[in-house]
Image (cartoon, rainbow, N blue to C red):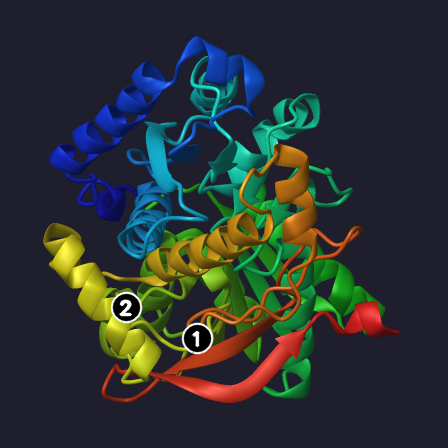
Amino acid sequence: MTEVASKLTFPGMLMRRLFALGAAVALTLSPQIVRAQEPGMSAKAIKIGILGSLTGPAAIFGTGNLAGATIAFEEANAAGGINGRQIEWISLDDESSPPKGIAAFKRLVEQEKVFAVFGPGSSAIGQALIPSFKASKTPVFISVFSTPAVTEPAVRTVFRTGPMNDRQQGIAIADYVIEHMKAKKISLIRQTDEYGKRGGEAVVGRLKELKVELANEEVFNLSDSDFTAQITRTIQAAPDVVIIYGYPNPSAIITRQAKQLGLKAKVMGANSAGSRKYPEIVGEAAAGTQNIITLQVLPEGDDPAAVKFRAAFEKRFPDLAKQGRPDLGDVLAYGGALAFNEALKRAGSNPTQDGFIKALESLKGFETGLTLPTTFSETQREGNVAARIVEVQSDLTRKMLPAIVRDQSAAK
């Protein structure tokens, strides 16, 4: 993951522009308006904070969070804004560091006084920010990361759409490998961080409920690049299916090394590994692998919604497009920002933070054409509770399978 993230530094010109936009908004707000209106509101603009990992190991998700939101906000502005107001934003880099994420969130809320925060982009940062979320009245909208820690229990100001949370996702994966892949013996290889821990626990817990014994469980650190020991033990356990719960780069390396070492089992991956670059990184060993993905269509596909977004993305971010983008995080963020914009519209001509929260709660089956439908309520802060399955074909293209998976334990 580190090697991939190092090539995904967000364009400096765009970063300077976003910071300048935020600064300009702060300078144009008169003292009277600041005192009379909600944070981040002026007569002509709504100021939003975008928080994410633009550098460090989670940069592929943080840059996706910023890029997707940027396109959605610019499209809204080009169409006349939200109820006559332009969206202005300031973007801060948490550098994939929880302490820096906490400091950045504090700056956005207390110094920049934004109306709402879009992000962050990684589970580790989100988990660390829970006390800050609880202490703040500022709405937070999440569209990329998946830890259930920020929504279970629910925090009134925090909403997530896009990815299923890792508890639900782990359960759905366990159900899928048993019901659809007909696995009798299952192994798990997962990251040691918040992302891998939550997802792995859910997989193991669901298998126990279904009285299926886990053949073996292996762990790895995000910075690891040699997985020989874990794979050797997994081969000795002789599973039918290996579930890999990790970020794109380590998941791809594990899959490639496992095939080189003689693993015969099928490979099932989590949503984070649903990168369009995954087959290229793995090579021919990727053929036949599957992973859960929380998108309606693939970003590289020929669906009209995918083609339209891809064209807009490639025009707006040509440097990222050269790296095989848009990818999962870009699409999730764009879809999330469309839902965010819809709620801003519903909040009315003089929106308040409380009114925005209520407007988000009114979204029911909101469609973007790219992401799965978004539904919130007074008690529901998880906008999406379903996912699809993508399979790598023999020519290393990806195919979306018809199955839609859910946390089946919740319906019983």
Q: Vertical placement of 309 versus 196: above or below?
A: below
**What residue would you read off at disc 2?**
309
Give the quarter of the image for residue 108.
top left
**What residue would you read off at disc 1?**
369
Quadrant of image for the C terminus: bottom right
Residues marked 1 and 2 touching at CB (< 8 Å): no
Distance from Cα at disc 1 to Cα at disc 2: 10 Å
Q: Amino acid at mark 2?
A: Phe
The residue positioned 25% from the left and 77% from the top of the image is 307
Q: Vertical placement of 133 versus 360: above or below?
A: above
Is the residue marked by circle 2 packed among few (<14), some (14-19), or many (20+) residues within 10 Å?
many
Give the quarter of the image for residue 213.
bottom right
Give the percent coordinates (x, y) of residue 28. 32, 19
Give the percent coordinates (x, y) of residue 257. 32, 63
Q: Vertical placement of 89 versus 161: above or below?
A: above
Give the percent coordinates (x, y) of residue 370. 42, 72
